[in-house]
Amino acid sequence: MEGQAYTERVLAEILPELQPDLVIANAENAVHGRGLNRRAAERLYEGGVEIITLGNHAWDQRELMEVIEEDTRIVRPLNYPGRPPGRGWTVCKVGQRPVMVVNVMGRTFLSQLDCPFQAVDDLLSVHRDIRHVIVDFHAEVTSEKIAMGWHLDGRVSAVLGTHTHVPTADERVLPKGTGYITDVGMVGPRDGVLGMEREAVLRRMRTQLPTRFTVAPGPCQFHAVLLDLSDETGRALSVSRIARYEQD
């Protein structure tokens, strides 16, 4: 089953049970592992996703250049230099409370973007009145993600790492009340290499020759986290992992 179909199936099962106030998905790999387009976004919305974040594959689908300008539910990395299409943050209402969702990208082994730490600092300095702030930090190395967690502890509701596809077991509430996990994990094929067909990946690693990657076949996995935030302060009360696995 392909990843989006499995997302729809799992959300249909868990949303009635958990009844979350807000559903956020990083969907930068939604189109066969490379970017996001209008159709993929609409499928996610229909399945229950309300806010979509992106990452280093943000511009793989050229169609997104237009979609992201008109759809405020899609958030690309905040720290792109200049004035790229779209926005690096959005605010939605949960009940009567504003919730800010921020997408920012790391630089170590990944990008040449502006400083992610300064970008978030600048944003928070302008929006001091919003207590509920969720940051998707799309970064390669664990040290940069952990550093961002400590940097923002007590100033945002949660720092959730994405990009490396493998869920980490370090979910916690930091001392000043920020929920944290180094990587949420992925939705997609379980038996490939980060979702890609494993023989092609092995061929690239063994020969160092150019190899075309395709999405792996087989059963899927679904990873997510559930945040419980204080209505009054916006601080995290708990962070818990969610994992589902499709049977062979």
Image: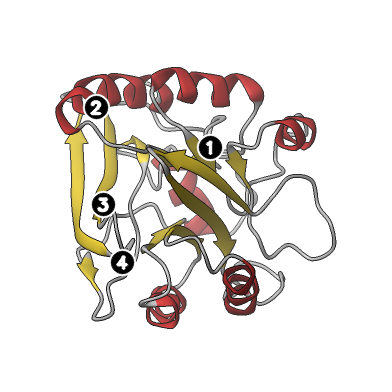
The residue type indicated by label 1 comes to Gly
x, y percent for residue 152: 43, 76
Residue toward you, 20 or 58: 20
x, y percent for residue 23: 37, 37
Q: Which residue is drawn at 67% across and 32% down?
A: 71
The residue type indicated by label 3 comes to Leu
The secondary element bearing badge 3 is classed as: strand
**Is residue 111 depicted above or below 184 in this figure?**
below
The secondary element bearing badge 4 is classed as: strand
- Ranked by sequence position, the earlier of labels 4 and 2 is 2
Instruction: State the separation of the CA atoms marked 3 and 2.
Output: 14 Å
Q: Which residue is drawn at 49% across and 19% down?
A: 43
Q: Do labels 3 and 4 touch, CB within 8 Å?
A: no
What residue does disc 1 label?
33
What residue does disc 2 label?
15
Mark 4 vs mark 1: in front: 4
The residue type indicated by label 2 comes to Leu
Instruction: State the separation of the CA atoms marked 4 and 1.
Output: 25 Å
**Is residue 9 depicted above or below 224 in this figure?**
above
Please give the label number shown on residue 227: 3
Instruction: State the separation of the CA atoms marked 4 and 2.
Output: 22 Å
What residue does disc 4 label?
180
**Is residue 93 depicted above or below 153 in this figure?**
above
Q: Residues within 10 Å of mark 3 (few under 14, many from 20)?
A: some
The residue type indicated by label 4 comes to Tyr
x, y percent for residue 161: 40, 61
Instruction: State the separation of the CA atoms marked 3 and 4.
Output: 10 Å
- Ranked by sequence position, the earlier of labels 3 and 4 is 4
Instruction: State the separation of the CA atoms marked 3 and 1.
Output: 26 Å
Q: Is residue 234 left or right of residue 120?
A: left
Q: Residue at x 18, y 33 (%)?
A: 18
